[in-house]
Image (tube, helix red, strand yellow):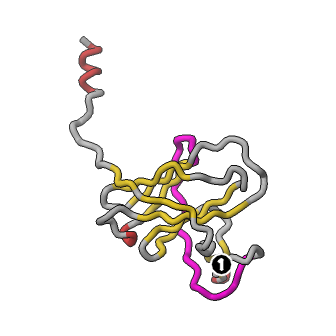
Amino acid sequence: MAAAALAGCSAGSGAKAEPAAKWGFERDDDLPLLCMEVSGGSVVAATGDGWAPNGDFVQLHLGGGSIPGRQIKSVTSETDGTRLTVVLESGGVSTLDLVWTEWRLTPPAGVDVASVGSLSLDYGDGNAVELDRLLVPDGDDASDPNGRPVA
């Protein structure tokens, strides 16, 4: 009898989970590195993973080893687009160098990039971490040591 009562509890409250909207994604090495503001108001290239709305897409800034490189498995959001979840392919062995990769995340029809309020990143282990929102460079011609514009 206790098992029957417990089974009834696990059936759920009847509330249905909101379906996830699938986003498109592609690596885009032509995008400038995202930036962050540091003490004193200076803007520099971001030193950690993060994201920012960039026109009609969301730009994702990821750091990691060059081999095999960070690869995205999926990008989804709540149907209203307010919270993005990015899942990376699970890791494995990687080189110890640090390379920044920029990703272009494109929303499905009917989702406005301006509505995105947060982005959670699952590094492939099932534990999602909310990333900081960064700054899109303002377009001047400064560049990093590899010649990519940063601010």
Residue depicted at x 28% and y 21% = 7
Mark 1 lies on residue: 150
Residue pictured at 24% horizontal, 11% vertical: 1
In what quadrant of the picture does the C terminus appear? bottom right
Dividing the picture into quadrants, the one containing residue 55 is bottom left
Q: Amino acid at mark 1?
A: Val
Q: Is residue 151 above or below residue 118?
A: below
Magenta segment range? Answer: 123-144
| Horizontal and vertical percent position of residue 26 | 52, 61
Majority secondary structure of magenta residues: loop
Q: Position of residue 52 (x, y in %)?
A: 51, 70
Return the residue nearer the eye: 51 or 9: 51
Disc 1 secondary structure class: loop
Q: Is residue 44 left or right of residue 31?
A: right
Residue at 26%, 33% in the rendered image: 12
Q: Residues within 10 Å of mark 1 (few under 14, many from 20)?
A: many
Residue 147 x/y as whole percent:
73, 77
Q: Nearer the viewer, residue 7 or 148?
A: 148
Which residue is pictured at 30% across the width and 27% down the height?
A: 10
Direction left: furthest residue? 14
The answer, for residue 35, to whether it is visible in the render is no
Observer able to see residue 5: yes
Find out whether residue 104 is within the magenta segment: no
